[in-house]
Amino acid sequence: MSTALTTWSLEMNAADELRAAAVPPGEAGVAVVRAEVASGEFGRFLYTAVGADCAWTDRLPWTRERWGDHLAEPGTEVWVAYQHGTPAGYVELGAQDAGVVEIVYFGLLPQFRGRGLGGHLLSYGVRRAWDLGERWEGRGATTRVWVHTCSLDGPHALANYQRRGFRVFDTVTESTVTQDTVSQ
């Protein structure tokens, strides 16, 4: 099936640009915890559970070892939202050169979408992006946080990023893309 695919790249250039969202009323029992052990199995679980219906395919061929190696890279962090002990979603951060941090992956498992948890989890992840250098020896302060999202992601993804204070700095539209070949 061919369709147009639009990808937006967004950025934030100062920590005080974040417009944080709180845990929504009625969504008690939410905790966000860093996955400090590089577990390829857990990384793959989060990636497939969140991204299966958003055409996330680029990491599907990865072996357990590649997952583990990637997650163990200095400056790579995975923050997981749990609601009453059940994984609800995650944010993967990737430190880059010159104080730049990318939100590499972000999303919620389908049964947790549409309840306001995404704003809270994204806010938490952005805060951790801004203070990432404090947790990694030799990394300087974060100077920029950026992310990309596309028209295959959830219908509220772009708006959530913008409500949190991200600004679009690039938009690319490909006129025909076969959905089977799209990767995050």
Image: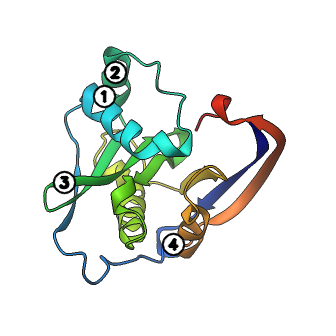
Three-letter code for the amino acid on which mark 3 is drawn:
Thr
The earlier-in-sequence mark between 3 and 4 is: 3
Separation (CA) of disc 3 from disc 4 = 25 Å
The earlier-in-sequence mark between 4 and 2 is: 2
Q: Quadrant of residue 42?
A: top left
Q: Are marks 4 and 2 in contact (CB under 8 Å)?
A: no
Q: Considering the numbered disc 4 on the image, is that residue within a helix, a strand or a loop?
A: loop
Q: Are marks 3 and 4 in contact (CB under 8 Å)?
A: no
**Vertical placement of residue 78 versus 168, above or below:** above
Dot label at residue 124: none
Whether residue 113 sits left or right of residue 144 in the image: it is left
The earlier-in-sequence mark between 1 and 3 is: 1
Closest to the observer: 102 or 97?
102
Three-letter code for the amino acid on which mark 2 is drawn:
Asp
Dot label at residue 72: 1
Three-letter code for the amino acid on which mark 1 is drawn:
Ala
Three-letter code for the amino acid on which mark 4 is drawn:
Arg
Identify the residue position indicated by label 4 in the image: 164
Identify the residue position indicated by label 3 in the image: 86
Say how many tags the image has.
4
Identify the residue position indicated by label 2 in the image: 69
Q: Residue furthest bottom?
A: 25
Residue at image position (81%, 48%) is 173
